[in-house]
Amino acid sequence: MVSSSGGNGGLAVACAGRKLSLPVTVVVPRSTSARARQLLRVEGAEVIVDGPSWQEANVLALSLLAAGDAFIHPFDDPLLWRGHATLIDGIARCGPLPDAVVVAVGGGGLLAGVIEGLRRNRLGDIPVIARRDRRRRVAPSLAARGANRRARGDHQYRHLARIRACSRRLRRSGGEARQDAGATDDR
């Protein structure tokens, strides 16, 4: 298995590879912390460091694929979103329902899954606050852009744009998009 990651996605692939006794190569950008690299190695992954950002690491990861290899995308896959959506399934079953859901946004996969889970459980009135650390090179704030900008995760951006989930939430909130020193807070 081959993946590209800034940390968590690659760690999940490395863990799965270890459990399945499959070799894993994870390509990470130079910005990935030494701790994240070490955790990947502890899980048995070969770690290759390349490029200043995830985009460059991803290009190299794709070029490494050989016949029989599987490329595991860290966030741009509907199967991942379905997995993330189960977080909302659990919340809906256990109650009480939250006043809002706060989602960390990197590539957008977790956000796509949370939106899918809210829709599936008919909880579309619960506001979603998408937060990203603006000091890092991550995807643009989905809510502030109406989820119509294609960036790192073509599939989830098309999906979110198609269901217009973030656009509706932005309209409902009066279009608020506040920023503080370390993050963007989009409703």
Image (tube, rainbow, N blue to C red):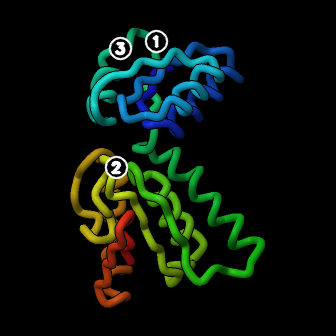
| Circle 1: residue type | Gly
| Cβ atoms under marks 3 and 1 closer than 8 Å | no
Foreground of the two, 115 or 144: 144
SS for tag 3?
Answer: loop
Camera-near label (3 vs 1) is 3
Q: Which residue is mark 2?
A: 136
Residue 78 position in % (x across, y down):
46, 47
Q: Nearer the viewer, mark 2 or mark 1?
A: 2
For marks 3 and 1, give the CA distance.
12 Å
* Residue at the disc numbered 1: 68
| Residue positioned most to the right | 94
Quadrant position of the C terminus in the picture:
bottom left
Q: CA distance from mark 2 to mark 3?
A: 26 Å
Callout 3: 10 Å neighbours few (<14), some, many (20+)?
some
> Dot 1: what SS?
loop
Tell which residue pokes out farthest to the left in this image.
149
Residue 4 locus on image (x, y percent): 41, 29
In this figure, which residue is indicated by the disc labeled 3? 64
SS assignment at label 2: loop
Q: Nearest the camera: 111 or 57?
A: 57
In the image, what residue occupies the spot 33% across and 27% down?
57
Q: Amino acid at mark 3?
A: Leu
